[in-house]
Image: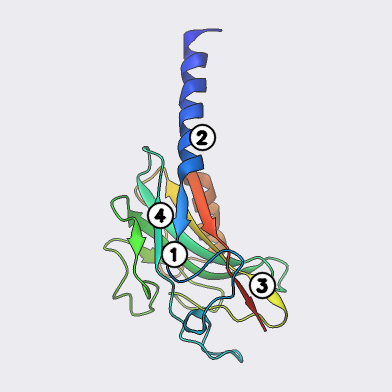
Amino acid sequence: MNKPIIGAFIALLCVSAQAQNFSLTSRDVEDGKQMGEKHLQNGSGCVGGDISPQLSWSGAPTATKSFAITMFDPDAPTGSGWWHWTLVNIPKTTTTLPQDAGNRNEANVPAGAVQGRTDFGNTGYGGACPPVGTHRYRFKVWALNVESIPVDKESSGALVGYLLNANSLATAELVPVSSR
């Protein structure tokens, strides 16, 4: 085997090992557990606080240049899921978001970060509110290989998702549920 191929293989193994250590935690939501009322939508028949949960992450690959957070409901009866929140261009020095970072007034958004448009039609966090049954809500942190992606507050979840997938080094997620 030649040296460039061996070097590339070793680099790939290192990134893969780092990605396995990448994790997302929260004091507010847990995998497989019902989301609290304050994290539910206030509307569409739900009574909640529309407050995004506290999130922290660690173990990102060393090549990370920025982060993003998304909340997506794959169980929405749309055929394409439902985007509840996109927050991108989070500086690589940021590894935690306080509760209510997704507030539509953007007072708690890290400097330089951008919240995209949700499927509710506005920016900021839109809480869980399944129309019927139990839905999974995928909170995902993305370690990105770019400092920023070219989006603004009118960018759809689909566009943001495309750009995140194109620039992702690693992801970690929490998947709480909500039932109605």
Neighbourhood count class around disc 2 (C-alpha, 10 Å): few under 14, some 14–19, many 20 upward: some
Height in image: 66 above or below 136? above
User: Which numbered disc flags the more N-terminal residue, 4 or 1?
Assistant: 1
Question: Which mark is drawn over residue 57?
Answer: 4
Quadrant in the rendering for residue 60: top left
Q: Secondary structure at mark 2?
A: helix
- In the image, taking residue 107 as reference, residue 137 lies left or right, namely right
Query: Depth-wise, is mark 2 or mark 1 nearer the camera?
Result: 1
Q: CA distance from mark 3 to mark 2?
A: 30 Å
Cα separation between marks 2 and 4 = 17 Å
Distance from label 3 to label 1 (Cα)?
19 Å
Q: Which badge, 4 or 3, comes first in the chain's sequence?
A: 4
Quick one: label 2 or label 1, which is nearer the N terminus?
A: 2
Could you tell me which residue is drawn at 73 percent across and 67 percent down?
Answer: 79
Q: Nearer the viewer, residue 76 or 58?
A: 58
Q: Is residue 31 left or right of residue 151?
A: right
**Which residue appears at 46% of the width and 25% of the height?**
11
Report the amino acid beneath label 4: Trp
Front residue of this view, candidates 90 and 60: 60
Q: Dot 3, crowdedness within 10 Å: few (<14), some or many (≥20)?
A: many
The residue under label 1 is 26
Q: Secondary structure at mark 3?
A: strand
Mark 2 — residue? 16
Q: Position of residue 178 (x, y in %)?
A: 62, 76
| Furthest-top residue in this view | 1
Residue to which mark 3 is pinned? 135
Q: Secondary structure at mark 1?
A: loop
Residue 113 sits in quarter: bottom left
Q: Amino acid at mark 2?
A: Ser
The 10 Å Cα crowd at callout 1, few under 14, some 14 to 19, many 20 or more, is: some
